[in-house]
Image (cartoon, grey):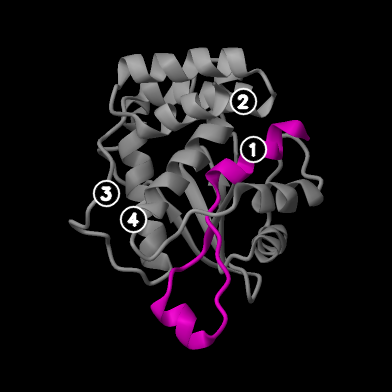
Amino acid sequence: MKRYLSWGLVAATMTASTAAAQQSGPIVIAVLPFEDRGSYGQDKEVFRALEFGIPATLAAELSRHPRVRVADRGRTSQAVQAQKLGPNARVDAATAAKVGSEAGAQYAITGNFGVDARVVDVGSGQILKVVSNSDPSLQDRADLSRIIQSLAEKVLAAVKLPAAGNAPGARAGTVPTDALTQYSLGLLYESEGDKTKAGEHYQRALTTFPEYSAAREGMQRVR
């Protein structure tokens, strides 16, 4: 279960006090574990790492929208752990809704390495929409960062948020897949309590892509 303890790194959450506040304030989107179908990566360790890295990157993309906030990671971690999900478990809509509710979210996102995502309305427990990477020009592993950016835009549309457009910080630069993989490995080892290995992989991610703010934040956490 400790492999899931860091899923709070890849979640966003808030509590709205009234319906009016929900309409004018931030929208809560909790990103849950993604199922590994073996679509990306070269070996078992990389597959495991991308179970952290893909949702974390998706969460980071979503949080750049001015109507989305980053969550308290501990609260979402506890909610995921409470569901006793096994390794590589497929999270159904009911489970996603429970996790989202416990985390204080309005929507919960889960999916697979396809890359496909299910947008779950926490209040109703129903799948609001399934969004997927259907762009024929984005089917190569080298395009993983762009695929996740595209997926984030579709998730935002599903919850009726307009594209972030040119807002400051709305979109990060495209991260090379090698850097994203090293960042994912950093998250994996950080979740297992191995700060030394985590730091090594975060540093490799930064060496490949010096502008990688998420990897820099990772380095700061494990120092």
Image quadrant in which the C terminus is located: top right
Question: At which x and y percent is residue 43?
Answer: 56, 15
Q: Is there CB contact under 8 Å for labels 3 and 1? A: no
Instruction: Tell me how far mark 1 sits from mark 2, CA to CA.
Output: 8 Å
Amino acid at circle 1: Ser
Mark 3: which secondary structure? loop
Question: At which x and y percent is residue 197?
Answer: 58, 13
Q: Please report whichever mark, 3 or 1, sits nearer to the chain's N-terminal start.
A: 1
145, 169: nearer the viewer:
169
Q: Which residue is mark 2?
A: 190
Question: At which x and y percent is residue 216?
Answer: 41, 27
Mark 4: which secondary structure? helix
Q: Is there CB contact under 8 Å for labels 1 and 2? A: yes
The mark lying in front, picked from 4 and 3, is 3
Q: Is residue 159 visible?
A: yes
Amino acid at circle 4: Glu
Asked whether, in this view, residue 211 is left or right of residue 42, the answer is: left
Mark 2: which secondary structure? helix
Q: Please report whichever mark, 1 or 2, sits nearer to the chain's N-terminal start.
A: 1
Residue 126 in which image quadrant: bottom right
4, 151: nearer the viewer:
4
> From what the image shows, is residue 160 above or below residue 136?
below
Question: Which contiguous range is marked in magenta?
Answer: 1-29
Q: Which residue is mark 3?
A: 169
The mark lying in front, picked from 4 and 1, is 1
Q: Residue at x 61, y 19 (%)?
A: 195
Q: Please report whichever mark, 4 or 1, sits nearer to the chain's N-terminal start.
A: 1
Q: Is there CB contact under 8 Å for labels 4 and 1? A: no
Which dot marks residue 153? 4
Question: At which x and y percent is residue 181?
Answer: 45, 23
Image quadrant in which the N terminus is located: top right
